[in-house]
Amino acid sequence: MNLNIQNETAELKAVVLGQALSMGNKPSLAETYDARSHESIKLGIYPGEDLVDKEMTAFEQVLIKHRVEILRPYLIPDCNQVFARDVGFVIEDKLIISNIIPAREGEQEAYKMLYDQVAFNKKFNLPEHAHVEGGDVVLYNDMIFVGLYTQEDYPQFKTARTNFKAFNFLVDLFPHKHFIPLELKKHDSDPRQGILHLDCTFMPVNDTKAIIYKKGFKFQKDYERLLDIFGQENIFEITQEEMYAMNSNVFSISPNVVVSEERFTRLNKHMQEVWGMTVEAIPYHEISKMGGLLRCSTLPLIRK
């Protein structure tokens, strides 16, 4: 397989879509590893497999409509495999296999069929103690934005997923790229106060436009740096409630077509009427209760 991912928005040719079947029992409060799932279990609204499968099928149908080749991970019984983004990610023609949290290590086996199709010298495992998940890595051609948490209390947060050692590994692997670290706020139990991954607070949706939640960054300078890159006129700023609903976690099929959640009315209207994009609005609200959304469910392999 000739991998090729340069950015988040070029025409999509092939993608891994997560697996909704055989999710197993709902986790206990102690077993949750993100703030939104923690809240959903606490409130008794964590979604069942039937609802998750229905929403992922809607996503699959949109991808089929746009003639995207879809791969699915092998089914592992009693294992939540919805969020493919964090198991691995592609930069240029290289597959980076994530050091995901121990609670999700079993998911890696389901991607053996993918790894076997990639040349040996195009697959990279991270060194020990270097942690990164695909939701924290956002590609923008020559620039790569990486969501980080570098504070001393990193080990205490379940929601701190990407560290500086992984950042340096990526910098060494792609010396010709310009890497931009962005420090995220973290909170393990309140999804309105912390950011799990960078794509939960920032996402480019075409060649020049981006969605941003200003208060997701620990440092004001990181937000201002994004404004300098994209320009205020090209930014759609979301509110805290829109961030909580995961408005930034949309998924671009091409520079002109974006898949979004049907309840994101303000964002969807803006993308259609102001940015002139085609918005494929689908139900994905139940999946958001597990701490991820559309981008989280995908592992893009080839873009034009």
Image (spheres, rainbow, N blue to C red):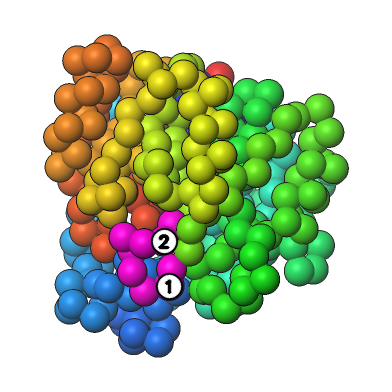
Q: Which numbered disc, 2 or 1, marks the residue that appears first in the sequence?
A: 1
110 w.r.t. 249: above or below: below
* Magenta residue check for 157: no
Left/right of residue 219 with respect to residue 75 in the rendered view: right
Q: Which residue is mark 1?
A: 188
Residue that appears at 31% across and 60% down: 192
Q: Quadrant of residue 106?
A: bottom right
Helix, strand or loop status at disc 2: loop
Are the residues flagged by discs 2 and 1 in contact, CB closer than 8 Å?
yes
Q: Is residue 283 visible?
A: yes
Give the extent of the magenta segment.
187-195
Q: Is residue 192 magenta?
A: yes
Residue 194, numbered circle = 2
> Does residue 208 lie above or below 130 as drawn?
above
Query: Which residue corresponds to the image point at 69% horizontal and 44% vertical from the top-left?
Result: 95
Q: Which mark is residue 158?
A: none
x then y, percent, for residue 285: 20, 53
